[in-house]
Amino acid sequence: MRIFTLGIVVLMLFVLNPTTINDNSIESISKIEASVEPSEKSATELLSELANQQFFIKEDQISEDDYVSIEAFGKAFVNLYTGAVTKQEIVSFENYISNANLLKFTDKMLELTQKQELNGASSVNFGFDNEFKEVEFKKLDKNLYYLRLPFSNEGSGMTCELLVQSSNKSLELVDLYFGYKDGVDTITTGHPAVRKLNNPKLWDDQEWVNGVFEKLEQYESELK
């Protein structure tokens, strides 16, 4: 199709003025040809870039100087998650989460949220083009920060709450919560009135984790 299109352009130029087919004309044709080539990255490529990003800080512990990096880290995670939901893609959160239980939960939450989306059971709009509002930071400990990210997509508003710490100068999530009405995390980890993000060891509490995964299993059976 590309060769065919180029041939038509050359033929038209020759018919109009057979003496004007020169290097400049060929250059113009090349520009026309290039303009119809797809230049935007695919959803898979964009998600891969987000998944492969790493966020580092200069010192061993987080400080106020790292707010810009923390904010970028949080927004990248949100875009990765919501983008994966809307595009029905499997992505890796390993550059954002190191805790095995939290990573397993986030993977499962994504899977079930994608099923909700396919079944028309979600009350919010997911996508890449999230519009973020003012970010809230709160220092909870010398190396632990609470981050609240309000955002919207196509008029649908949501909030993502994150607990962020650093390990070997790399930022990582130790807890996360979207908490909208029919959200998988709301159903399995608690209502916003009781679900607080202030414990970096929460996902090491195996008894609590087991209860969460039991609820995940039950909810998954209801989605089928």
Image: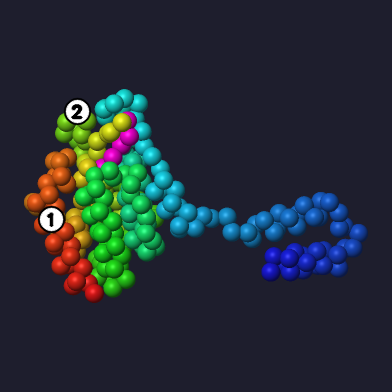
Is 84 on the left or on the right of 22, as rendered? left
Q: Can I make out residue 191 in this image? A: no
Secondary element under disc 2, as helix, strand or loop, is loop
The mark found on residue 210 in the picture is: 1
- Which secondary structure type mostly characterizes the magenta part of the structure? strand
- Seen at 90% across and 63% down, the residue is 18
In front here: 17 or 127?
Answer: 127
Label 1: how many residues lie within 10 Å, few (<14), some (14-19) or many (20+)?
few
Q: Which residues are magenta?
A: 169-173
Left or right placement of residue 25 versus residue 197 in this view: right
Query: Residue 56: percent from the left, percent from the top?
Result: 36, 33
Query: Which amino acid type is shown beneath numbered disc 2?
Result: Lys
Taking the image as shown, residue 30 lies to the left or right of residue 46, namely right
User: Does 158 appear in magenta?
Assistant: no
**Secondary structure beneath label 1:** helix
Query: Is 221 positioned to the left or the right of 126 in the image?
Result: left
Q: How many marks?
A: 2
Q: How far across and down, in percent of the image, does residue 208 sit? A: 10, 51
Between residue 170 and residue 16, name the one nearer to us: 170
The residue shown at (19%, 57%) is 185
Q: Residue furthest top?
A: 59
Residue sitting at 75 percent across and 57 percent down?
29
Residue 121's place in the image compared with 52, above or below, is below
- Quarter location, residue 191: bottom left
Local packing at callout 2 (Cα closer than 10 Å; few below 14, some 14-19, many 20+) is: few
Disc 2: which residue? 142
